[in-house]
Amino acid sequence: MANIDRRGFIRSLFGITGVLPVAQQMAEARGQVSFFWCNLNNGQVGFPTGLSVPTERPGSIMKLVAAAALIDEGLYHGNEKYQCTGTYTIGKEAVHCQNAHGKIDLTQAIGKSCNIFFAQATKHLTARAFLDKARQFALDKPCAGTASGAFPTEPSQSGSLHYVLGLAPDLTPSALQLMRLAALVGIAPGAALAPLHSAENLDLKAKEPLFVSPLTALSHKVLADGMRLSATAGTAKKLDEGDKLKVAAKTGTTPHGNKFQSYVIGYFPYDKPAHAFVLYAPSGTSQDSAVPKARGYLMSTTWP
Ligand SMILES: [Zn+2]
C-alpha cells in the first residue's frame, strides 16, 4: 500500500474493469466538461457548455443524502465519531480511504469524504430510507426542463452502502439534479427553492413544482458545515483558494471504463446562498479534474 500511487490507489478502491463505449471515449478525448449554474433567487439556470446534461453515477456526492438520512432518521445525533484507519471490511466488501482519517464526526466525514465513516455510520440505514431521502431531494424528478436520470422504483441493493457511495448503477441523477441537491442543502431548512428554468433556451419550459428543503435545523447545519469544510480544507479545497466566493462544495469520483469521471457541486456564498453550480468531468478524479475545471468557470466571471 505504501508504494502505490494515487491513481493506482483509487483504481484499487473500485476494482476497475471494462472498456468505455466509443461515444464516451470520444467525449473523453475531447475532454468535454459540463458546467451548469443557477441563480437561487430567480431560478435561472445557465448552460455555458451546452444543453447536453450528463446522467452518471454521482459517487461521494450521495454522502450528502446519506448524512441527511442518518440525522433525520435518528441514526446520528450530531456528535458521534467513527474511526477511519484507511481500510474497513463490511460483510464481504472492503471499503478504503486514501488516507486514514482517524476518529472523525459526520461534518468532518463530509468535508474529507471519508468512505469508512459512512460505511460504519450507515450500517443500519436501509436502502429504502436512503432512497426516501433521495426522493425528498428530488433526485427522481426532472430539473429545469430536462429528464430525471435513473432512479430505482425498488432498491436493487441489499444494503444502502452502494447508494451511499454513489456507485449503484440504478441511481444516476442528472448533473442538473445534483446542482439542485446543492441548492436544496444551501437554502434554509424548510425553505422553498425558486423553480429552476433555463435562462438561455426558452424551449426548456419550467413546469416544476416548488421544491422545499427537506432538512431539519440539525441536518442543515451538519451538511452545510461539511460542504464548507470540503471547500476550505477538504476534497474541494482547491476550488477557491482565496475564498473569494465563499463556496460550500462536495466532490464525487467514480470509475469510468478503465479511468475515472468526477463531479463537484456547490453553492455560494455559504452564509447567504445566491448561486449553485455543478461541474461534470468525463475524465479524471475530482481533485485532478472536476475541481480545477470548476474553479476555471467560477473564477472567469463576475457573479452578481
Ligand atoms: Zn476515511
Image (cartoon, rainbow, N blue to C red):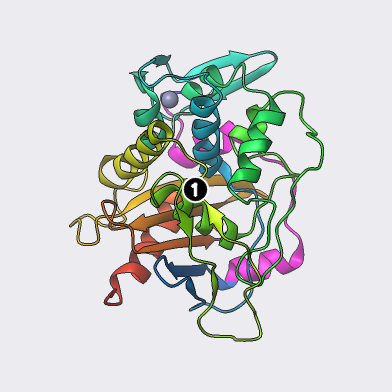
Quadrant containing ligand 1 reads: top left
Q: Is residue 288 magenta?
A: no
Is residue 15 visible in the rendered image? The answer is no
**Residue found at x 49% / y 32%:** 67
**Residue found at x 33% / y 68%:** 298
**Dot 1 beta carbon under 8 Å from ligand 1:** no
Q: Which residue is mark 1?
A: 213
Q: Position of residue 229 (x, y in %)?
A: 30, 40
Q: Which residues are magenta?
A: 3-29
Q: Is residue 106 left or right of residue 229?
A: right
Q: Is residue 304 left or right of residue 74?
A: left
Q: Position of residue 92 (x, y in %)?
A: 70, 15
- Note whether 183 is above or below 80 in the view shown: below
Q: Nearer the viewer, residue 167 or 18?
A: 167
Q: Nearer the viewer, residue 13 or 304?
A: 304
Q: Position of residue 39 (x, y in %)?
A: 41, 70
Q: Is residue 82 left or right of residue 181?
A: left
Q: Give the position of the C terminus as an image quadrant.
A: bottom left
**Residue found at x 41% / y 14%:** 83
- Note whether 38 is above or below 263 in the view shown: below
- Note whether 266 is above or below 132 in the view shown: below
Q: Is residue 16 magenta?
A: yes
Q: Nearer the viewer, residue 165 or 142?
A: 142
Q: Nearer the viewer, residue 88 or 248?
A: 248
